[in-house]
Image: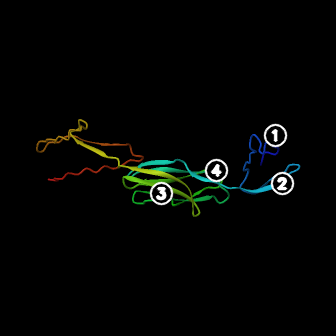
Amino acid sequence: TVTSLVTIPAGLTAPSSAPQVSGMGLGSATISASAAGFAADAEPVTVALTATLGQDAVSVRAARTQSLAVLLSAPAPVGGYSVGLITDDAAVATVSPATLTVPQGQTSGQAQLSGIAEEATVVRLCVGATEVDQAAVTVGPAARIQACAGGLGCSNTNLPLRIGKDLQRGFTARLEEAPEAAVALTATSSDGA
C-alpha cells in the first residue's frame, strides 16, 4: 500500500513528510503518482523477504557450540526459505547446517556455530550467491577442568600432594563452566604402579 494523498505546499517541490510505501505481501507492484498540470510517473516496487543474522557479534568457546539465529522480515513462504551459512575460516569455527531452511510460516531458524580454535573469524549469511549479512565470531579458550587431589577444595598453590603407601585421599574435579549435558570425567595417573 502507499499513502494515497499527499499535499505539496505552494513554493515547494516535495511534501513536508514523505509518503510511505508498505509491503503487504511478497511480489511486485507499480506505484504511480499524478497531479493536475504535471506529467505522471510510475516506479516498480518489489516486496521481498529479507534475511539477517540475529546478532552482529558471536562468542563461543573452543570445543563448544552456540546457537545462531537467522531472522526473516516476514513469514517464510510455502516450501520454506533457504539461506546459506559459512565461516571464513573452518579451522577456527564451523556453522551447521550450511544450508538452513526456515519452515513455511516461520520468521526465524536456528543454526549451530561450533568453536574449533581460539581465534577470530566471520560467519556469513547468503541468499543464493549474494551475501546479505555477516557477524564477527570470537572463539575463546576451551573450558578447563581443575583437578585437585586432597578433597579439601582446589587452590592455586599447585603444591604436591603427599599420600602414604597404601593410603587414600580424596580427589576433586571442577569444571570451569557447567555443561549442557552430563559429561564423563576420566582421571588417570602418570604412574599406575
Residue 149 vs 92, above or below: the answer is: above
Distance of mark 1 from mark 3, alpha carbons?
A: 55 Å
Disc nearest the viewer among 2 and 4 = 2
Q: Secondary structure at mark 1?
A: loop
Disc nearest the viewer among 4 and 3 = 4
Which of the two labelled residues, at mark 2 and mark 3, occupies the earlier sequence position?
Answer: 2
Which of the two labelled residues, at mark 1 and mark 4, occupies the earlier sequence position?
Answer: 1
State the residue position of label 1: 9
Cβ atoms under marks 2 and 4 closer than 8 Å: no
Distance of mark 4 from mark 3, alpha carbons?
A: 22 Å
Distance of mark 2 from mark 4, alpha carbons?
A: 32 Å
Distance of mark 1 from mark 4, alpha carbons?
A: 35 Å
Q: Position of residue 105 (x, y in %)?
A: 66, 52
Q: Position of residue 9 (x, y in %)?
A: 81, 40
- Determine the residue positioned at 73% across, 50% down: 24
Distance of mark 2 from mark 1, alpha carbons?
A: 18 Å
Q: Nearer the viewer, residue 178 or 34?
A: 34
Which of the two labelled residues, at mark 2 and mark 1, occupies the earlier sequence position?
Answer: 1
Which of the two labelled residues, at mark 2 and mark 4, occupies the earlier sequence position?
Answer: 2
Q: Nearer the viewer, residue 22 or 116?
A: 22
Please indicate whether residue 154 sits to the left or right of residue 138 in the image. Answer: left
Callout 4 environment at 10 Å: few (<14), some (14 to 19), or many (20+)?
Answer: few
Amino acid type at mark 1? Pro
Amino acid type at mark 4? Ser
State the residue position of label 2: 40
State the residue position of label 4: 73
State the residue position of label 3: 95
Callout 1 environment at 10 Å: few (<14), some (14 to 19), or many (20+)?
Answer: few
Disc nearest the viewer among 2 and 1 = 1
Distance of mark 2 from mark 3, alpha carbons?
A: 50 Å
